[in-house]
Amino acid sequence: MPDDVRAPDTLALLQDLISRRSLTPEDAGCCALIGKRLSALGFRLEWLPKNGVTNLWAVRGESAPCVVLAGHTDVVPTGPLTQWSSDPFEPSLRDGFLYGRGAADMKSGLACMVTAVERLLSRTELQGSIAFLITSDEEGPCRDGTRHVVEVLRERGIAPEYAIVGEASSMEVLGDRIMIGRRGSLGCNLRVHGKQGHVAYPQRADNPIHRLTPALNELIAMCWDRGNAHFPPTSFQVSNLKAGTGAHNVIPGEAEAVFNLRYSTELDAERIKARVHAVLDRHIERYDADWWHTGEPFLTPGGPLVEAASAAAQEETGLHAERSTGGGTSDGRFIATLGTQVVEIGPVNRSIHQIDEHIRVEDLERLSRIYEHTLERLLAA
């Protein structure tokens, strides 16, 4: 491996990854491409597929500490192709930016991780070990990807000390934010049962909308917690409402609502459910609540990993990165259950999941060096 592995090599790898139509849960050969390069560096490759999802666990070294570099090859659908300035799976360079689906979320993170490791191993001896955990099930249900690999590691008694997730964490410019945790996410599909009838004879019906409305109002107004030094207060949001037969003079027999709570470490899923059911039971006689839980909150408030990533980002960008727990969820929530310190650091996220997704080309070399110097701080002999 040459000593001067730089942005051109990172750019070429990223272009190759973008050109592969890895719409979730498809991998389209991305892991095989990365695995070939890792194998050349002495990584032991293990394939852990499940239900059509591609999962790669690749390790170099035997001793502690172990740093996991984690990411996903799957991407979200493109949306209307006619609205893209160029084919989303034909990477296009324009005005210093690379355009294509996955350019920011998160094939760039993976490409930068690979070239960072290539460059680092070409010039220094390391103590400890490096692992890659790559999946094609992050943009989808997240059941058979990183969650599955983590359960395999748990069964084997493997608990890496550190993990870096290459999600697009930066807000405006590269390195302005590092994620040190994420909120938990708990949702509910609620169906309220009433009795259909004529609006002129409400005494012969039971209007589920009238039962649902005061319950939702109470839940919306509730102070769930006040957050803490690292997390904002828990939020409750209604995302969907459905009721009615389409006729103006019919009281419907059912009403449905979908709501979600993004919650802090002040709460857990079972306590939230209990508080919700207490409200529902006061207002609604008959209902079904179908809960879905995508992860508990996790937090790495400080320690060697946070300090190493912050120092590497500041060295490369000159910025003192904000340490945040905002935004959505990531696969870091599964890795953290092993007791692993987790941070997310990656490119600017302004275009993720959008038409004409893109990344600034000059950020590729800089992000690769941030990963390289973070690893060096944690593993240098």
Image (cartoon, helix red, strand yellow):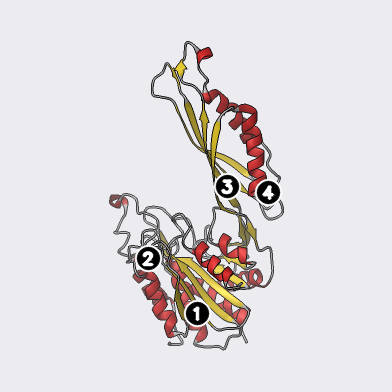
Residue 89 in the image: above or below residue 194: below
- Marks 2 and 4: in contact by CB < 8 Å? no
Instruction: Of the two numbered discs 3 and 1 on the same chain, state the one appearing first in sequence.
Output: 1
Question: Can you tell which of label 3 and label 1 is closer to the viewer?
Answer: 3
The residue indicated by pointer 3 is 186
- The type of residue carrying mark 3 is Leu
Instruction: Of the two numbered discs 1 and 2 on the same chain, state the one appearing first in sequence.
Output: 2
Question: Can you tell which of label 1 and label 4 is closer to the viewer?
Answer: 4
Mark 1 to mark 2 CA distance (whole Å): 22 Å
Image quadrant where one finds the N terminus: bottom left
The residue indicated by pointer 4 is 267
- The type of residue carrying mark 4 is Leu
Instruction: Of the two numbered discs 3 and 4 on the same chain, state the one appearing first in sequence.
Output: 3
Secondary structure of the residue carrying tag 1 is: helix
- The type of residue carrying mark 1 is Val
Mark 1 to mark 4 CA distance (whole Å): 38 Å
Q: Position of residue 303 (x, y in %)?
A: 69, 70
User: How dense is the environment of label 2, judged by Cα within 10 Å: few (below 14), some, or many (20 and up)?
Assistant: many
The residue indicated by pointer 1 is 117
Q: Position of residue 208 (x, y in %)?
A: 52, 25
The residue indicated by pointer 2 is 27
- The type of residue carrying mark 2 is Asp
Q: Residue at point 59% right, 80% down?
A: 376
Instruction: Of the two numbered discs 4 and 2 on the same chain, state the one appearing first in sequence.
Output: 2
Q: Is residue 194 left or right of residue 353?
A: right
Instruction: Of the two numbered discs 1 and 4 on the same chain, state the one appearing first in sequence.
Output: 1
Residue 207 in the image: above or below residue 373: above
- Marks 2 and 3: in contact by CB < 8 Å? no
Q: Position of residue 369 (x, y in %)?
A: 52, 76
Q: Give the quadrant of residue 20.
A: bottom left
Q: Nearer the viewer, residue 210 or 305?
A: 210
